[in-house]
Image: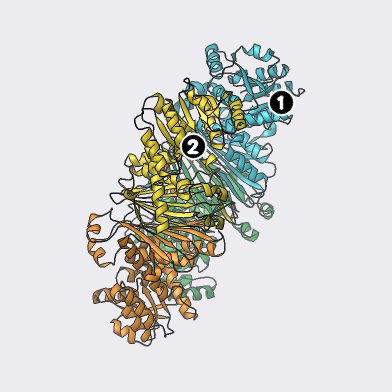
Chain colours: A green, B cyan, C yellow, D orange
Amino acid sequence: MKVGLLGAGRIGQVHAKSITSNPRSELVAVSDVFVDAAIKLAATYGCESLTTEEILNDPAIDAVLIATSTDTHADLIEKAVAAGKAVLCEKPVDLDLERARACLKAIEDSDRPVMVGFNRRFDPNFATLKKQFDEGGIGKGELLTVTSFDPAPPPVAYVKVSGGLYRDMAIHDFDMVCWMFGEAPVSVTAIGSSIVDDDIGAAGDFDTAVVVLKFEDGRIAVIKNSRRAVYGYDQRIELLGSEGLLSANNVLENTVEHISVNGAISAKPEYFFLERYKRAYEAEWAAFVEAVEDGQPVPVSLADGVLALTVAEAATKSSQSGLTVNMNSI
Amino acid sequence: MKVGLLGAGRIGQVHAKSITSNPRSELVAVSDVFVDAAIKLAATYGCESLTTEEILNDPAIDAVLIATSTDTHADLIEKAVAAGKAVLCEKPVDLDLERARACLKAIEDSDRPVMVGFNRRFDPNFATLKKQFDEGGIGKGELLTVTSFDPAPPPVAYVKVSGGLYRDMAIHDFDMVCWMFGEAPVSVTAIGSSIVDDDIGAAGDFDTAVVVLKFEDGRIAVIKNSRRAVYGYDQRIELLGSEGLLSANNVLENTVEHISVNGAISAKPEYFFLERYKRAYEAEWAAFVEAVEDGQPVPVSLADGVLALTVAEAATKSSQSGLTVNMNSI
Amino acid sequence: MKVGLLGAGRIGQVHAKSITSNPRSELVAVSDVFVDAAIKLAATYGCESLTTEEILNDPAIDAVLIATSTDTHADLIEKAVAAGKAVLCEKPVDLDLERARACLKAIEDSDRPVMVGFNRRFDPNFATLKKQFDEGGIGKGELLTVTSFDPAPPPVAYVKVSGGLYRDMAIHDFDMVCWMFGEAPVSVTAIGSSIVDDDIGAAGDFDTAVVVLKFEDGRIAVIKNSRRAVYGYDQRIELLGSEGLLSANNVLENTVEHISVNGAISAKPEYFFLERYKRAYEAEWAAFVEAVEDGQPVPVSLADGVLALTVAEAATKSSQSGLTVNMNSI
Amino acid sequence: MKVGLLGAGRIGQVHAKSITSNPRSELVAVSDVFVDAAIKLAATYGCESLTTEEILNDPAIDAVLIATSTDTHADLIEKAVAAGKAVLCEKPVDLDLERARACLKAIEDSDRPVMVGFNRRFDPNFATLKKQFDEGGIGKGELLTVTSFDPAPPPVAYVKVSGGLYRDMAIHDFDMVCWMFGEAPVSVTAIGSSIVDDDIGAAGDFDTAVVVLKFEDGRIAVIKNSRRAVYGYDQRIELLGSEGLLSANNVLENTVEHISVNGAISAKPEYFFLERYKRAYEAEWAAFVEAVEDGQPVPVSLADGVLALTVAEAATKSSQSGLTVNMNSI
């Protein structure tokens, strides 16, 4: 599979490594609005630096990976599908739910595969938990908890254009919950707070939040978010079922323990997403290649991306109103 | 300290052991509406079986421990205080908030010590976490999670008279949260569900719930309750702060690990409260004796008991309405 | 069962608590060469302070617990058995193997139960490991490791009269190994060192040692001893079998974990044997009472005590000679 | 650095990946006695398939990685050094200690870097433990334990030509011990057994062994080996020091825990060395490249390789004789 990479920033570089190390895919071109970034990344992997249009118009390119800024995602998905490319697009589809829904509608008649990059589904630990759950290991799922803390808050300038905690950060967790339970929730209740960083509060956003999602049959999921866990990236899942509990714990930096009169010290979690989800990014790309090459449905659809955004919209409204929000009303 | 025990049921028997094994207290009499139960327990510890009135009227008795049925708690507290006894009363003060508040008012002019039996504060693990938190180990508290699952649902007959999940079961967790953060929350949001046992739902109660409490300065606490965790009593606390995370994990039945081709198997948590909180009940009684004998304030006041009940009332209203409930409105 | 306690020192006090809290036994008398110690302990539990002779001659006393100094053990066992008492004697039987063997011979025609106090067999964790092993959980045992470190070295004055590391400290581990594998080893290889405390070396003893025991069918056990693990009492067992590995880990002071930028700190092991083996002492006594009252063999025989001492003798010779010592030669 | 790879078998393939993914090294040629294997591996990485002589004679090649059969190592090291190449050679240097010593002598006047592939030193967990130890985290080292179990015994045909458990398997552990303590032991005591696989015993080898190494100042190290731990590759280190204990535990397949009425099940260790030491092989190669390119001493010298072999020789003699063997006598 010949691949064009749109976007040569931090996350584009992560994907470039996955594309080039996968034996079934070949990176043939990179584009970026900062041409120098594209040239540099292309040089590293011995491929071409082109414009986005050149990539989309090149019939030899089978697939594009969209790792550009969020506001261009929906447009690029539509153009790439129109150009006959298979697409893997970074999350979110768009910050605006209507635009995301329009994008979904725009491509609905196409048979080109479009996948959204919810990388956490491909984390080996979460994937193992999901597999054990699907195999019936704990019976019926009843109460799901997602812990998702970043190591440090982003700059306020970023917060202001991010769409807010729910659309920017929790959206991964919304996808995780819907994926685990295999459907959309019926209602969303969100309680947000600004306690970590006053500037985030001044910008009208939250840095700490709890979101509770309720499902048709009464199952409940709770997501806990914080923009700051000084010890690193805290990413855990815990699922109580009728016959037991499944949990996926953090990945630690090493397995060393040091016991002294002060107690037993072991390692912190991996610091942030580049470390923790290194293997997840590789597996995500492999899953995309496999689905496209084998003509199977992609494991994360554009509809999944829109669903997560819908939950984010509901959470935003709930946080503002103090009311539980019905998903039908969004 | 000479002690009269009111109530010779399961929890009364637990307390009898604590009273008799503490070097500073002596069990002198037991009463119960089932006289045979009182006679049997009195025989075990070589003390008298009396009526409740006889105990309250005996000037040689310094303190009473109230372990009778919930609907008698408030009356007995008032009578015991009027009789000049120091009181340790099992939770809850009453299922009816107004009655509990009246009880608090009734004794406000007395100087007799009245303590409510929130035993979990005395669990060595939770007490250690609280101590480390108070010493500044994680800076400012921001997001507190209490996991509190029972091993199996109670009979529906019990559920019907229990006051509901929030007043009966979560009340311990409400006290835990208020104790950890040192004050009452400003608002309560509760989402309940009946997914474990249809009969509980038919009786109008929940068996699974998430309660989110928000505090004046933006701190958030989330409580997760389930009436059924088949693997045992799941009692954990986790507190994210500005400088780290404190967690108190379950107490396991033993420290053995068995590794085979099927993975590594270790022990389950202790089965239920009698096992898990054995040391907590002893420590609770010791704290009561110490406070009374040394003329210090009891570590859990009647006002604390009323506060937990107020949160339970708010949670009940929130679950029914789908609205966040302001504590001022209760 | 009416019990006389010989010895009111530290370990005698531990046993007094077990005897008095067991519903099937009653402490009726205490003796000690320091009469004041006996009087004080007797007062605590409301029993008599007598001489050892008075206890042995009292036909109302069914059993004695020998917690006196080591050099009196063998004599007291013989006298108590002659007086028709059931006996639980603290380890070791004697520091001199010949004396211990003579004691074993002296009582061989008696039917009075004599048990040696290898308390670790009754630790709930080690007992659970043993049970899982006996039930076939890991198939055939192949390689057993016993880690046994004290928190701090004893005074050199004690070391000089202790019989040395192998007879004083490792003897518990020798019993553990023989119990786990259900028989005596065929050879013993010991490597000792004095690296913790120069005074211990100057006194001709070791403070650090590794002992390797080989069994008839090729099974191997290795014991690691140190007189100093500053973090507490390190008591672990690990057993590799044909189908897996069983391990029993330390009991920690609490379950709290504190994660910060410096890593994750959890609690140390319980400090020393009084803390770690509190439940083991209670279970040991209960097992003795049960065996005697129900007419069953005691779970740790005097022959077991002599066997452990024989291994200690072999280890001592091996450490001195640099040779593997055949058990037949001892 | 232009690299020629000698040997295209399983371990050669592992190294090929490290060489090609390291930005400072380039794989230019591969040789193997099975020419087809060399051709295939060369094709995978787009380099040449040559004979070993061609590689050694090519002045453009800076370094060779020797991953051929053990009996060719010493010869190839000498030839490569004579040809001016930097060398990274797989362990062991030779099964015959005299040949290994001759090789060491043969290259002593050369300034070409020669490194031996003791990959475990580069495992991030063991390296972290070593670093914390060297920084004084536990004071003076006193008692070191190395647990090293393979998942399954090798074919007997392999065992027969392997040089035996000590030269083939434990040699890694001998290097680990000498590296940790920074010097050679003064004596070696080894107890071997054949209990896992009768055919291994019949071939005159052991499948289970304990080796105790004593150092000049009294420090002791104990190595536990088994050819079979059905649950996977068990590779742990534990070091007791004057101020605490450091341990490096196994790397597990994932972080999922499943709690049910049967207990808490978590993942097994990574299965074997290709999984467990994947990162170690990459780090080993990076360390070699860095040392050679920056003109620094290699982190594992040929003398280190000869030392480990000397300990293996001592262990073999000790196992056969039942005597502690002085290293001076080897």
Q: Disc 1 is attached to a residue of which chain? A: B
Marks 1 and 2, how far apart at CA: 53 Å
Amino acid carrying label 2: it is Thr
| Residue A230 appears left or right of A1 | right
* SS type, badge 2: helix
Picture quadrant where residue A161 is located: bottom right
Q: Which residue is mark 2?
A: C72
Kindly tell me whether residue C142 is visible in this rendering.
no
Estimate the x, y position of residue B129 in percent, counting from the top left: 61, 43
Of residue B71 and residue D99, the one placed in the foreground of this image is D99
Badge 1 local density, few (<14 within 10 Å), some, or many (20+)?
many
- Left or right of A326 on screen, residue A64: left
What numbered label is drawn on residue B113? Answer: 1
Could you tell me how many numbered marks the image carries?
2
Q: Residue shown at 52%/34% (left/top)?
A: B276
Horizontal and vertical percent position of residue C213: 36, 51
For the residues bearing labels 1 and 2, Cβ distance under 8 angstroms:
no
**Which disc is residue A285 wearing?**
none
Rendered location of residue B103, percent (x, y): 69, 21
Q: Chain of mark 2?
A: C
The crowd level at tag 2 (other Cα within 10 Å; few <14, some 14-19, many 20+) is: few
